[in-house]
Amino acid sequence: MGESRHVFLVQGSAAEPYEVLIVYEGNEFNAQCSCPAGNNKQLCKHVIGIINYAFIGNNRVEIVSDNEGEAFDLHQTFSGTKSHEAMNDLDEAEKALKDKKAELKKLLAPFEKEVKDRKKQLQRTLLL
Ligand SMILES: [Zn+2]
């Protein structure tokens, strides 16, 4: 099986749609986007959008080229690639961070209340 290339036109914030290029071969799955973030070698919402589209058919990404079906088919090729693994690792890390933030919020609540109460107390004793 050789290399496969797909180009999707994605409507972003600019008037002209961005070009998301997807190249895959075997276990390698790579993407590139023509948006400013993509040009800076940063992972952008258009690439993430295409992958999400492939996985959950979510259309938060607006594909304006007539090959939406190809995006949906990426699901099979993305599965099991290093990028898929990395994406799952990211999801896990994000969930763990979210959980810890919730714990931290609970932990801080009594201290925040204490500060608020003390402030009220000072206000009562100090102000006319
Ligand atoms: Zn982009």
Image: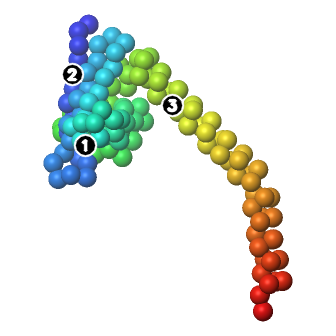
Residue under label 1, please give it. 36
Alpha-carbon span between mark 1 and mark 3:
23 Å
Looking at the image, which residue is at 66% across and 41% down? 99
- Residue 35 coordinates in the image, percent (x, y): 24, 41
Q: Name the spot of residue 30 as percent of width and height, x first.
A: 31, 23
The answer to which of 67 and 122 lies nearer the viewer is: 122
- Type of amino acid at the residue the image marks with label 1: Pro
Mark 1 within 8 Å of ligand 1, using the beta carbon: yes
Residue 90 tag number: 3
- Circle 2: is it few (<14), some (14-19), or many (20+) Cα within 10 Å? few
Q: Label 2's element? A: strand
Assign the N terminus to one quadrant of the image. Answer: top left
Residue shown at the point (30%, 32%) measured from the top left: 41
Say whether mark 2 is within 8 Å of ligand 1.
no
Q: Quadrant of residue 33?
A: top left
Tell me which label, 1 or 3, sits earlier in the chain.
1
Q: Camera-side residue: 2 or 86?
A: 86
Task: Name which residue type carries label 2.
Answer: Arg
- Locate residue 43: give its quadrant: top left
For mark 1, give the secondary structure: helix
Residue 5 numbered tag: 2
Name the residue located 28 percent from the left edge and 45 percent from the top edge. Answer: 62
- Say few, some or many: other residues with alpha carbon within 10 Å of mark 1 (under 14 / 14 to 19 / 20 or more): few
- Circle 3 crowding by C-alpha within 10 Å: few under 14, some 14–19, many from 20: few
On screen, residue 102 versus residue 34, left or right, reads right
